Image (spheres, helix red, strand yellow):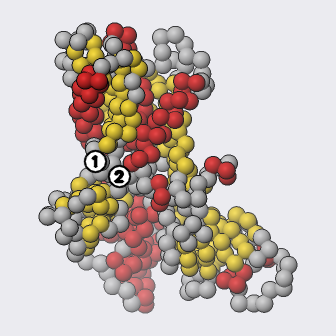
Amino acid sequence: MAILKNEKDLVVPGEVLAEGLDYLPGYGAFREGDKILAKNVGIVSIRERNVGVTALSGRYMPKAGDKVIGEVLDVQMSTWFLDINSPYQASLSIGEASEEYVERGADLSRYFDVGDVLYAKIISVSKHKNIQLTMKDIMCKKLRGGKIVNITPSKVPRLIGKAGSMISMIKEKTGCNIVIGQNGRVWIKGENEDLATQAVAMVNEKSHLDGLTNTVTEFLNASPGVKTTSEAKVFEYVEGETNES
Amino acid sequence: MRADGRASEELRELVVKAGVFKNAEGSAYVKMGNTVAVAGVYGPRELFPKFLQKADRVHLKCRYNMAPFSTKDRKRPGQDRRSQEISKVVADALEPVIFTKEFPKTGIDIYIEILQGDAGTRCAGINAASVALADAGIPMRGLVAAVAAGKVDGDYVLDLTYNEEEKTKADVPVAYAPSMKKITLLQMDGDLSQEDVKNVVDVAIKGCEKVHEAQVGALKNKYKEAML
């Protein structure tokens, strides 16, 4: 009949979140009889009638529409196979990678070779976990140079922040180019790579603190090599972004 | 009163810790009296050899291993018939609580190491493995708690030590998932009457509920610390 947990409560698998049929199990929750139970160790989130759990650990499970960072593992006749930090490999076919006409039997490694890192979008995930990627989307490209940092996939939304507030702040302060994949991979390139890495790691570790954007801002302001506030402000103005309160 | 001063339905000193290792995706430490077990979990990940892959669900690979220094006489290192059997029953005890259909074709690896043995090693192993699975973020219907019970001198006793195990008529390890109210492992080494079995299992389930509290506490402790 009632909800038994509050928003942001910490729960473990098997804990009862709600009783009765008034609520529906969301992500990270399931129904057993007339009860809704947690599937993961995580934080309770309540969205109207949906009760779910945001996991605090675990592997990335591919979802159609997600943009991910993948590494090319294999090049075949008309397909590339990519590691996308999930239990399944993803495939990118030539038609989804290039607008050009490609001769049958052409060497695909002149587009992408083994070891290349791509930012690509998942177009479909079948029931049997065949994953199709595409490069035909804005921002999808080969990532050259830089470095890759891994974070917990469920914490990606926190790293992006409300309307991108967190990540745009880190970009501004460090002057780095940063690309975030939904699969928990973060690509960083720029002069202050190490500083940006530390900021990303900080978000990953302290993801459930309130006012995290301010904490990270303070951390970055106190570090040497960070752009001064005035410079950052000019940048901010040009980008036309708003600050999170 | 028992040899170590416990009441008949009292557990040994129980310590549960979650996330004790950095490299494994999930890990746990469990100490039940003088029995010490650690577990590490990897996955779900791509499974090889390929013939082990199941098209509709995950393959649970479990390895139970005793350290050479875990017993009074040195234990010959490596897998033997006993450890192979326990590996299998532990995997079977954990499978019912895992959402296996969510990860077709993949494998989850569970490694259980017994650092010190004083009876009830499979139970300690299951307790550690179940916390490690939750720590690794694998979706589960609940945790599995396990503890053995038996009958010594006409008394139903919980969480037997090695010395008690020698005196008991039968040693009954029970694994129980409190969230589903289901028994996932039930073995009996020895001979008991029908009525005795019922009573022993009841005692064991009560013990499992206490162990479950400690497991929940350990997981919450780890993640609370991470959040501060």
What residue is shown with label 2? B141
Measured from the top left, where is residue A178 in percent x and y? 52, 73
Q: Say yes or no: labels 2 and 1 on the same chain.
A: yes
**Structural distance between the alpha carbons of marks 2 and 1:** 7 Å
A204 relative to B51, above or below: below
Measured from the top left, where is residue A77 in percent x and y? 80, 74
Identify the residue at the far front of this view: B194
Measured from the top left, where is residue A140 in percent x and y? 59, 81
What residue is shown with label 1? B179
Would you say residue B216 is visible in this rendering?
A: no
User: The C terminus of chain A lies in which quarter of the figure?
Assistant: bottom left
User: The N terminus of chain A lies in which quarter of the figure?
Assistant: bottom left
Front-lying residue, A24 or B56: B56
B105 relative to B146, above or below: below
Circle 2 marks a residue in which chain?
A: B
Question: What amino acid type is highlighted by mark number 2?
Answer: Arg
Front-lying residue, B191 or B228: B191
Asked where in the image residue A135 lies, by quadrant, the reply is: bottom right
**Direction from residue B33 to residue A114 in the image, left or right:** right
**In percent of the image, x 51 and y 17: which residue is there?**
B69
Marking on residue A34: none
**Direction from residue A33 to residue B126 in the image, left or right:** right
Would you say residue B190 is visible in this rendering?
A: yes
Q: Is the residue marked by circle 1 packed among few (<14), some (14-19), or many (20+) residues within 10 Å?
A: some
Q: Are marks 2 and 1 in contact (CB under 8 Å)?
A: yes
Judged from the image, the secondary structure of the residue bearing numbered disc 2 is loop
Count numbered badges in the picture. 2
